Every structure is written in structure tokens, then in C-alpha cells.
Image (cartoon, grey):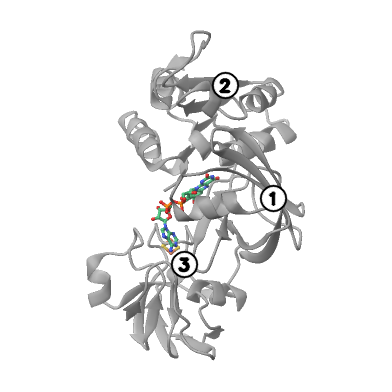
Amino acid sequence: MSSSPEHPSDPGAGAFSVRLAGTDLRFTVGPGERILAAARRAGIWLPFECGWGSCGTCKATLVEGEVELLYPDAPAVEPRDARRRRILTCQTTPCSDLTLKVLRTGPTAERPTCDHRAELLDAQELGPDIRRFRFRLDTTSRYRPGQYAIVELGRGLRRCYSMTGPAGLDTVEFIAKRYPGRAGSTALFTLSPGDAVPVELPYGDMWLRPGERDIVLTAGGTGLSPILALLRELADTADTRRVHVFYGANTEEDLVCWDELQALVAGLPAARLHGALLKPSESWSGTVGLVTDALRVRLPELRGAEHYLAGPPVMVDAVLTLLREHNAPIDHIHYDRFG
Ligand SMILES: Cc1cc2nc3c(=O)[nH]c(=O)nc-3n(C[C@H](O)[C@H](O)[C@H](O)COP(=O)(O)OP(=O)(O)OC[C@H]3O[C@@H](n4cnc5c(N)ncnc54)[C@H](O)[C@@H]3O)c2cc1C
Ligand code: FES
């Protein structure tokens, strides 16, 4: 196996063929294309979840052939993977014809991901280094509110952004934060209206489950994006379940879309909004502290709810620990770690 960091080199002029061991399935992968993307384009289902290198769900064994790892330091790559010739199909491109062994495969029955060309319409300042980006897609989008897209912000520079708006339109909206000096968000914030980028969607497991359980939506920072999408869906469908929204940030300035959240919550019959600020002004009436502090006091009554959470890894992990301490059922916890 050969590897390069952020920018893959061209693996060759032609396309390569991938055969799935133990099946009669075969598909073609274009130059520099990711194996997972090529498979789903061919209508073949391969296991995946995050789509970019964090979960490890897409690991396959390389039986024959040579590949280029497009993101060798991905969080899901373990030291023993190279020894066992295991690769992430979401971050690997062939350098020759391949035979792969995967745990499960078959024709795709799931909502397939789709490639779009997305043209930036506008970017609105919401807070310090936080903007709402609106893109026009070349075709109507198909996703569930709460899911995310992978935006290609340069060759090999793929980053995940959660859609905040309703599906079925030819526009998508993301709320994103800029991290100065870091590649992905800097490239996103450098785009001007009219610029176009490739966008692949949908990904992710953060969609609203039916049922009777109360709903708890917990967001930290820009983790607000999928939470806003879920809340909008609840409002659009006039959902009657009890809903609690927890949203944490550093200061009032960072608590973007607060008015929008208040309006959505006010429109639902049984919803409440709880804010938590680390450094509030004197007029702040919510929790002073972390979003986990706001959640902790109400968790005994909410442990059996359907939980959705999104935000920085440290916040998501803290909430997961809290939920485990309260024996919240794991099947009813859905989360995106924004890292
Ligand atoms: C499911 C999900 C949804 C997200 N939704 C949002 C959102 O709605 N709004 C928002 O502002 N942010 C969101 N993020 C975070 C976003 O994707 C970026 O991580 C963030 O913008 C910082 O990117 P950066 O390149 O500036 O920082 P960096 O620190 O350079 O990179 C950020 C992350 O990308 C990983 N990475 C590095 N190289 C590669 C590579 N070659 N290929 C793939 N990944 C690589 C790094 O490991 C790191 O975890 C989401 C993340 C995830 C996982
Ligand atoms: S799909 Fe998650 S690591 Fe590949």
C-alpha cells in the first residue's frame, strides 16, 4: 500500500476494476476516485457510516492489488490495519485492479448518496467566525433533516457539514465555523458567491425516529446545524411529542440562531429551550456553565427520551458519559461528533 496525506497523487490515467471476493459483483473506479463512491455509483452497497474516516465501518480486506490511502492518519485507521491489509473504502483509491473482501454487500437498498455541484448563493454572518452558507444544487436534494453532506473544498480536502434546512429543495444551507489556519473551514470561508464545489449527500444517522418517546436535542457550538434541522422538521409536522432543546456556547454572541430556536420552540405544543453559557452577560437567565450542566439537572426525567446530540467531540463525549451514568438506553441515542 502507498500513502499520501491531504492531496492524493494521480493513481494513473485509466480506471481500475474492483472485484468483491465471494460474489459475482464487480465495479469500476475512476482515476483518483474513492472505492466507496464508485461502488454506490454502480448500485452496489458496501458498509459505511461517516463517509470520511472516523468510524471504521467501511473497512475491507485487500486480497489482491495496490491502493493509495488518501487519508492514512484517519481516526479509524489502526496500526494493525496495514499488517492485515485492511483499508477504509471511503478514503482509498486503487492503483491497480483489486480484489476486496467485505463483510456484507449486495445491491443498494438504502437511500444512495448523490454527487452534486453546489454553487454558493450567499454567506451570512451569524456570529464571530460563524456563517450560514446557502448553496444552489444542480438537482433537488434527497436527505433526511439532521443528515450531513461531504463538501470537497479542494483536491482531497473533504469536510462534513450538516444541512440545516428542509430536504427536497434545490438549495442546501450549512452553518459553519471558521478555525483560523485550518484547511477545510478556511477554504469554505474563502468561497465567494458564484463559486462551485462538489458536494456528496446524504450521510449520517441523525434523523428523527418515529415513536412516543420525548425528544431531547442537545447542541454545542455549530452542532446546532442538525439540531436546527430536526427542530424545523418537528415544527413543520406540528409534532406533539415533548421536546427539550439544550444549546451551549461560550458567550451570547456565539449562541447563534437563538431567536430562531425560540420561535420554533414557541410554535410547538410541548417544547422547551434551555441555554447554557460559559461567559454570560449579567442579563443572561439561563444556565451558567456547560450544556451538560443544563442537561444534568433534568436528566432523571429525560433519561428514557430519544436523544440527538451534535457538537465538538469533547462535548459529545461528555453528554454520552452523562447519559450512560443515567442508564439511558443506547439504542435511543444518536449523535454526530464534529471532529
Ligand atoms: C458528521 C459531521 C458533521 C459536521 N457538521 C458541521 C457543521 O454543520 N458545521 C461546522 O462548522 N462543522 C461541522 N463539522 C466539522 C467540519 O467537518 C470540520 O471538521 C471543521 O470545519 C474543521 O475543519 P478544518 O479543516 O478547518 O479543521 P482541521 O482540524 O484541519 O480538520 C478537521 C477534521 O478533518 C479531519 N481531516 C483532516 N484531513 C482530512 C482528510 N484528508 N479527509 C477527511 N478528513 C480529514 C481531521 O482529522 C479533523 O478531525 C462536522 C463534522 C462531522 C464529522
Ligand atoms: S465510512 Fe466511516 S471510516 Fe469509512
Looking at the rendered structure, the kind of residue marked 2 is Leu
Q: Earlier in the sequence, mark 1 or mark 2?
A: 1
Where is residue 156? Give x, y as percent: 49, 68
Q: Secondary structure at mark 3?
A: loop
Q: Is label 2 within 8 A of ligand 1 (CB to nearest ligand atom)?
A: no
Residue that protrudes farthest toward the top in the picture:
282
Rounded to the nearest angstrom, the CA distance separating label 1 from label 2 is 25 Å
Rounded to the nearest angstrom, the CA distance separating label 2 from label 3 is 37 Å
Q: Nearer the viewer, mark 1 or mark 2?
A: 1
The image quadrant that residue 279 belongs to is top left
| Residue pointed to by mark 2 | 273
**Residue for point 70% across, 31% down:** 235
| Residue pointed to by mark 3 | 47
In this rendering, the answer to whether 119 lies above or below 322 is below
Looking at the rendered structure, the kind of residue marked 3 is Pro
| Residue pointed to by mark 1 | 172
Q: Are marks 1 and 3 in contact (CB under 8 Å)?
A: no
The quarter of the image holding the N terminus is bottom left
Q: Is label 3 within 8 A of ligand 2 (CB to nearest ligand atom)?
A: yes
Q: Residues within 10 Å of mark 2 (few under 14, many from 20)?
A: some
Where is residue 282? Give x, y as percent: 49, 8
Looking at the rendered structure, the kind of residue marked 1 is Val
**Residue for point 42% across, 40% down:** 312
In this rendering, the answer to whether 162 lies above or below 17 is above
